[in-house]
């Protein structure tokens, strides 16, 4: 690696991070986040309180019970703070009108046969909405079973599935429990979130950085600096210098966004990343490797696209074709939950343009065959020098074509001249 | 020529079906100012780009400062025809960066940039942005960029384009300085009077081929083989030795005398003396370069 490569990289970095447009874009995202946070705070303070008052009235919470069935003469001990028994409807009505009760329920004489209940509440929306017959279920079940079954069965009947104790074990095709899912009921969800989060970050980083590369090359072509540059340094020094320098520009931007995200969420994002990292260090290390290779591949392609167009707009259209390739894995993301190893996903993992994003989406599920990881990394690693070789040929030919785009035939001819 | 600065042997380059450079061979000696002339689209820029390794020839070989094209990048200064600079950078910063790209350390490049800006009379614009410069200033900055690393060989493609007479004079002065320092200059230009005043040898390219090549003085004489420049003008139109008389287009106090076939310079001098004419100046005529240029290019069109 020549000294000039680093001169170019440093120059590209410095001139780009100083651009007003760059500083604006870098600060815009945290600024929007901050505005969002302020709005959210406002709503949780103001609107939140309003909504809360709608659904949890601050009036009385007690519910009166008037029993004609003979099953609920006494309120069971566990429900004393929620229910009060009344001898007749008149007494209950008086208590309701005196605002001692939120509502009262009249249980019909033939309740066991019909399940008939009548609830009485004050005629306003708040109260009416807060009385839900389903809420009565534990009380009714408990009352009916009292004296018939033992207490532990009674309590379980009122709360059949303790959500804190529910486990989900997923089985693979051989019937063995899948490790990640067995360890922790949330690891499946965690996998999905890591998968989305890391590949989104990868996608943004690669696209942001490689787009800077496209802009820089296309600008040099528009400014007619190119010929002077390639008379001073070799095209490959120039390309590598730009790829490194502008990769750092993109990473700086994404880095600022991430730090801002951590600060704005009060460390929540950092905590999330920490938890996910603890879940799977290997996945994050692989993400780094996929990022480097993916960026190199896309960076070189975008730089070449930048040299192909006659104007920035045209170059961006050409570059857009490559970005589309990066977005394809997202389109099939929905199907991955069902099967992260579906054939299409495996195929896209072996194709260099889609490999980084596809593998990042699949890896966190923890069930990707090792051959896919090794294979996709190998294909990526081999395609980088190949694209670099072809890119600098096309680059060299196209950068002198002012006002005229290279035809496909000319591109092929450039490639033949090794 | 021993160890020429530039040596090209049958360079050939085609684009699609157009032959841009057709078997061009030439040599440029160390320390000379060499003119590369030709009408627009003749192939000069393509030839230069092959010497700079920006284009690869389809066939033929070249050596620049004794090395294959591209290998001696750091010792060559190149002013491209299609040129521009980083518009958003400051003048001094831009110049320093190109110095670094040519292999200078940052400090050396910055120091040299200051000197050169002084030399091209842009020192007061050192902190201005490149895009704030006028066209002429931009051109001078571009030339300073070419010279930032004190190159042994300087290739200038249309250096006078868009310059006013004062700046033309400045650039001409720079080229003369380069020659005085023993640098080699390859100059492509359309301003024939400037080429005449700067170049020792030229190559005239037309439609990709070299149609004239050699020492400028020889070529000029070769194109006016039987004529004399005489001053002061004399009334000799009726003499038997003389075929025609024409005033010199550039210097009105001189006269060009075309001799009849078979009459030598010596015969005419004898006739002058016999007639007792006062002669202050008497020399074999040479054709002005622009006339040669037009003649050669037009003749080629008729072929």
Image: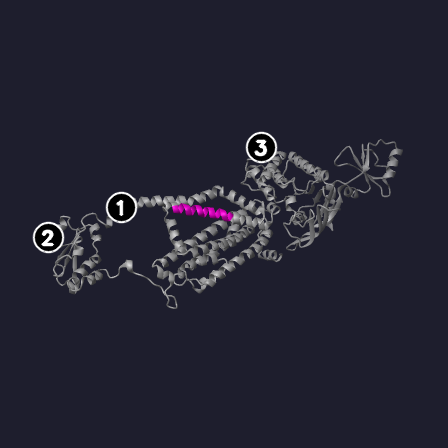
Say which residue label 1 marks. Answer: A49
Image mark for residue B124: 3
Q: Residues within 10 Å of mark 1 (few under 14, many from 20)?
A: few
Instruction: Give the mark, 1 or 2, whose residue is nearer the N terminus.
Output: 1
Q: Residue at x 10, y 53 (%)?
A: A90
Q: Residues within 10 Å of mark 3 (few under 14, many from 20)?
A: few
Say which residue label 2 marks. Answer: A91
Tell me the chief SS of the magenta region.
helix
Q: CA distance from mark 1 to mark 2?
A: 34 Å
Determine if residue B136 is in view.
no
Label 2 resides on the chain identified as A
Q: Residue at x 79, y 39 (%)?
A: B285
Q: Magenta residues, as a range?
A: A246-262
Compared across the picture, whether B206 is left or right of A227 comes to right
Q: Would you say residue A259 sits in the magenta stretch? A: yes
Residue B102 location, quadrant? top right
Compared across the picture, whether B62 is left or right of B113 comes to right
Q: Would you say residue A242 sits in the magenta stretch? A: no
Q: CA distance from mark 2 to mark 3?
A: 99 Å
Check disc 1 and report its element: helix, strand or loop.
helix
């Amino acid at each position: 690696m020549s000294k000039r490569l680093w001169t170019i990289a440093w120059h590209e970095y410095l001139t780009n991070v100083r651009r007003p447009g760059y500083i604006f874009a870098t600060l815009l995202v945290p600024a929007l986040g901050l505005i969002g946070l302020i709005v959210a705070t406002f709503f949780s303070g103001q609107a939140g309180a309003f909504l809360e008052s709608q659904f949890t009235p601050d009036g009385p919470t007690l519910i009166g019970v008037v029993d004609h069935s003979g099953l609920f003469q006494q309120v069971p001990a566990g429900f004393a703070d929620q229910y009060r028994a009344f001898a007749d409807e008149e007494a209950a009505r008086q208590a309701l009108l005196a605002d001692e009760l939120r509502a009262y329920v009249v249980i019909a004489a033939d309740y066991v046969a019909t399940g008939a209940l009548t609830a009485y509440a004050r005629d306003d929306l708040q109260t009416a909405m807060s009385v839900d017959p389903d809420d009565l279920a534990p009380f009714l079940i408990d009352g009916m079973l009292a004296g018939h079954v033992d207490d532990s069965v009674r309590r379980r009947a009122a709360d059949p599935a303790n959500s804190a104790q529910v486990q989900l074990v997923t089985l693979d095709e051989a019937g063995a429990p899948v490790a990640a899912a067995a360890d922790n009921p949330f690891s499946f969800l965690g996998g999905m979130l890591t998968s989305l989060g890391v590949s989104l970050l990868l996608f943004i980083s690669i696209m942001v950085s490689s787009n800077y590369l496209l802009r820089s090359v296309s600008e040099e072509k528009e400014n007619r600096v190119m010929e002077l540059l390639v008379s001073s340094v070799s095209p490959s020094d120039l390309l590598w210098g730009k790829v490194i320098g502008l990769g750092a520009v993109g990473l700086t931007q994404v880095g600022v966004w991430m730090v801002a995200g951590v600060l704005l969420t009060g460390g929540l994002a950092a905590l999330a990343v920490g938890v996910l990292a603890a879940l799977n260090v290997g996945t994050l290390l692989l993400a780094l490797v996929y990022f480097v290779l993916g960026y190199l591949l896309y960076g070189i392609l975008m730089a070449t696209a930048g040299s192909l167009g006659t104007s920035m707009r045209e170059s961006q259209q050409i570059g857009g074709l490559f970005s589309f390739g990066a977005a394809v894995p997202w389109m099939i993301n929905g199907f991955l939950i069902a099967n992260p190893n579906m054939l299409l996903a495996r195929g896209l993992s072996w194709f260099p343009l889609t490999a980084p994003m596809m593998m990042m989406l699949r890896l966190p599920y923890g069930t990707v065959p090792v051959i896919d990881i090794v294979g996709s990394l190998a294909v990526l690693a081999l395609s980088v020098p190949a694209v670099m070789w072809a890119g600098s040929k096309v680059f060299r030919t196209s950068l002198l074509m002012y006002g005229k785009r290279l035809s496909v035939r000319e591109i092929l001819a450039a490639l033949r001249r090794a | 020529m021993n160890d020429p600065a530039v040596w090209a042997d049958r360079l050939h380059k085609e684009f699609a079906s157009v032959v841009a450079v057709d078997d061009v061979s030439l040599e440029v000696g160390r320390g000379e100012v060499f003119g590369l002339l030709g009408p627009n689209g003749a192939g000069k820029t393509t030839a230069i780009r092959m010497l700079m390794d920006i284009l690869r020839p389809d066939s033929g070989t070249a050596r620049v400062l004794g090395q294959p094209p591209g290998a001696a990048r750091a010792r060559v200064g190149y002013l491209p025809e299609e040129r521009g600079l980083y518009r958003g950078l400051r003048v001094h910063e831009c110049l320093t960066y190109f110095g670094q790209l040519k292999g200078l350390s940052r400090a050396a490049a910055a120091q040299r940039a200051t000197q050169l800006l002084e030399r091209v009379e842009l020192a007061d614009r050192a902190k201005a942005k490149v895009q704030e410069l006028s066209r002429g200033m931009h051109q001078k900055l571009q030339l300073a960029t070419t010279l930032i690393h004190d190159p042994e060989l300087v290739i200038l493609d249309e250096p006078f384009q868009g310059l006013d007479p004062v700046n033309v004079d400045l650039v001409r002065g720079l080229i003369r300085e380069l020659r005085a320092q023993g640098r080699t200059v390859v100059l492509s230009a359309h301003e024939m009077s400037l080429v005449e005043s700067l170049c020792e040898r030229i190559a005239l390219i037309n439609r990709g081929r070299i149609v004239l090549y050699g020492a400028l003085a020889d070529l000029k004489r070769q194109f006016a083989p039987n004529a004399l420049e005489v001053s002061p003008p004399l009334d000799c139109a009726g003499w038997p030795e003389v075929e025609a008389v024409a005033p010199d287009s550039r210097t009105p106090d001189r006269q060009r005398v075309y001799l009849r076939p078979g009459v030598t310079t010596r015969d005419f001098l004898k006739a002058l003396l016999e007639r007792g004419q006062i002669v202050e100046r008497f020399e074999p005529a040479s054709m002005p370069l622009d006339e040669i240029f037009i003649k050669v290019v037009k003749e080629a069109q008729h072929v």
